[in-house]
Image: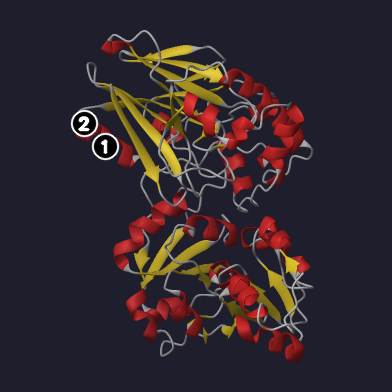
């Protein structure tokens, strides 16, 4: 049996290429939308991908299962859950007709070559969620080797059950989903200790609150060491534990749920943005075209096209841009040319396909002469915050997560997580200056650019609340709540 985890560091997402080396057939479980890299890996190992499967309707990225199905692969998807959680695209092939798709119920089985798969219904994270148990019959095994658990069991955590409410807006779902997850955990308790767990996400994913960075684990280890699993002594203790402290989901999660259910647009080839000169970029209206500037903060802070979005190509790039840019906007990047493909892939994975152009970041200095309106962002040191509050009396906006805010904050500050800010701009007054901070100054820099794009006058607090709290320890005039 061939087995390979393909990991996206930015989305902390894992897909699995599993193949039968005797027949040369393979399947990809939970692929992202740019499927060419899975195809290249399969080809390099003498395999052809004949099938693709999803463990559930994902919230954090667009699935590539439809892309594979469009090219003739068989799609394996869940038929569990109620009518609201059924796949709606299976009969909508782009040229007409129905895809080669198999709907799976709990206990259903299928084979890829000599590799045997069994679907196990594990609701909680979502109502239709499946795991895929894998047995290598080509190697003579009669018991499963491992199980692709999707967003059910992670290393050190479980898939959060609140997303249908907190991200997709389905009122009242968090508690009932947590109860469903508790019942699924009773089933997990019966899995053999040796069974390898191949999770759908790792550390950094917003699909849980404490995911580990180890790529895989075993059922026995998680029963012994996973805090969420160990909280299952009673149903209520589990519900209280699993719902407490979950991070605010990025704004684009609701769109991913919708699109993966209704069917992601067939992508085919990746977008190929054209290189633009300074004059073309200067002619853009940043209010209607999203100019995404990927340079470092110091450079952006000192000079950027007015209305630009600040989003360096770091681990949070997908979450930042997905939370600040809508699917209908055209996107122009300010970027190093060698990283254009990386950025395009990041964006199409969250459904932002309208990447139409890019400016070589090395040519940014040509923009002013070409007529572009160049702006800068005001920034102060955390130690100067009290003087700022006394003199200018700004509206203080804390863009950390709610759990961080609850642990300590500046008295009178308002709290909106930066990945939810675009949907809550009505809570931020336009008739006052806005002093923005996070924990260390990274998220607030991104939030400042978003606010400036929407007409706010902002100041970033360098060093964030961490630096503020340190300064306040020696300055009693600085107030904390």
Q: Identify the disc placed on residue 91.
A: none
Q: Does residue 46 sit above or below 311 in this rendering?
A: above
Q: CA distance from mark 2 to mark 1?
A: 6 Å
Which residue lies at the image location 58% right of the left edge and 83% below the top edge? Answer: 379
Image coords of residue 458 (percent x, y): 65, 80
Which residue lies at the image location 58% right of the left edge and 20% below the top edge? Answer: 189
On screen, residue 109 versus residue 380, left or right, reads left
- Which corner quadrant holds the C terminus? bottom right
Q: Does residue 411 sit above or below 250 in this rendering?
A: below
Which residue lies at the image location 44% right of the left edge and 37% below the top edge? Answer: 64
Image coords of residue 361 (percent x, y): 36, 75
Image coords of residue 67 (percent x, y): 42, 36
Image coords of residue 19 (percent x, y): 30, 23
SS at circle 1? helix
SS at circle 2? loop
- Which corner quadrant holds the N terminus? top left
Find out whether the residues at labels 2 and 1 contact each other: C-beta distance under 8 Å: yes
Examine the image and state in which quarter residue 182 appears: top right
Q: Does residue 467 sit above or below 204 in this rendering?
A: below
Q: Does residue 438 sit above or below 190 in this rendering?
A: below
Examine the image and state in which quarter residue 336 appears: bottom left
Q: Identify the disc placed on residue 45.
A: 2
| Front one among 281 and 118 | 118
Residue with the mark numbered 1: 41
On screen, residue 364 versus residue 464, left or right, reads left
Q: Is residue 206 visible?
A: yes
Q: Is residue 455 visible?
A: no
Number of numbered discs on residues: 2
On screen, residue 173 versus residue 436, left or right, reads right
Few, some or many residues within 10 Å of mark 2 (<14, 14–19, 20+): few
| Front one among 54 and 179 | 179
Few, some or many residues within 10 Å of mark 1 (<14, 14–19, 20+): some
């Amino acid at each position: 049996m061939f087995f390979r985890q393909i990991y996206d560091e930015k989305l902390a997402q894992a897909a699995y290429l599993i193949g039968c080396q005797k027949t040369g057939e393979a399947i990809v479980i939970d692929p992202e939308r740019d499927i060419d890299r899975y195809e290249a890996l399969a080809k390099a190992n003498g395999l052809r991908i004949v099938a693709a499967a999803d463990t559930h309707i994902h919230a954090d990225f667009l699935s590539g299962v439809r892309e594979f199905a469009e090219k003739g692969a068989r799609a394996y998807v869940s038929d569990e859950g109620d009518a609201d959680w059924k796949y709606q695209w299976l009969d909508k092939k782009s040229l007409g007709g129905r895809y080669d798709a198999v709907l799976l119920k709990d206990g259903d089985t299928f084979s890829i070559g000599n590799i045997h798969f069994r679907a196990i219904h594990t609701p909680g994270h979502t109502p239709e969620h499946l795991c895929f148990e894998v047995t290598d019959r080509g190697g003579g095994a009669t018991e499963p080797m491992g199980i692709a658990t999707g967003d059910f069991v992670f290393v050190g955590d479980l898939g959060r059950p609140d997303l249908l409410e907190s991200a997709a807006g389905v009122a009242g779902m968090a508690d009932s989903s947590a109860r469903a997850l508790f019942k699924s955990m009773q089933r997990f308790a019966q899995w053999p200790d040796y069974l390898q767990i191949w999770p759908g996400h790792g550390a950094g994913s917003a699909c849980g609150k404490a995911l580990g960075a180890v790529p895989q684990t075993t059922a026995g280890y998680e029963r012994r060491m996973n805090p969420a699993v160990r909280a299952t002594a009673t149903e209520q203790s589990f519900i209280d534990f699993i719902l407490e402290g979950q991070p605010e989901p990025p704004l684009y999660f609701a769109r991913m749920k919708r699109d993966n259910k209704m069917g992601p647009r067939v992508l085919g080839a990746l977008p190929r943005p054209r290189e633009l000169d300074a004059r073309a970029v200067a002619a853009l209206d940043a209010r209607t075209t999203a100019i995404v500037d990927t340079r470092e903060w110091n450079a952006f802070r000192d000079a950027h096209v007015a209305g630009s979005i600040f989003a360096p190509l770091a681990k949070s790039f997908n979450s930042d841009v997905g939370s600040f840019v809508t699917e209908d906007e055209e996107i122009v990047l300010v970027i190093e040319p060698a990283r254009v493909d990386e950025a395009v892939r990041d964006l199409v994975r969250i459904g932002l396909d309208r990447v139409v152009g890019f400016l070589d970041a090395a040519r940014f200095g040509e923009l002013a002469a070409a007529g572009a309106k160049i702006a800068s962002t005001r920034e102060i040191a955390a130690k100067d915050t009290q003087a700022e509050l006394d003199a200018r009396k700004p509206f203080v906006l804390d863009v950390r997560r709610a759990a961080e805010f609850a642990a300590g904050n500046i008295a009178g500050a308002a709290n909106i997580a930066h990945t939810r800010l675009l949907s809550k701009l009505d809570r931020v007054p336009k008739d006052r200056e806005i002093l923005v901070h996070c924990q260390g100054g990274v998220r607030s820099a991104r939030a400042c650019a978003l606010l400036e794009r929407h007409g706010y006058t902002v100041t970033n607090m360098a060093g964030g609340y961490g630096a503020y709290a340190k300064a306040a320890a020696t300055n009693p005039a600085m107030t904390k709540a």
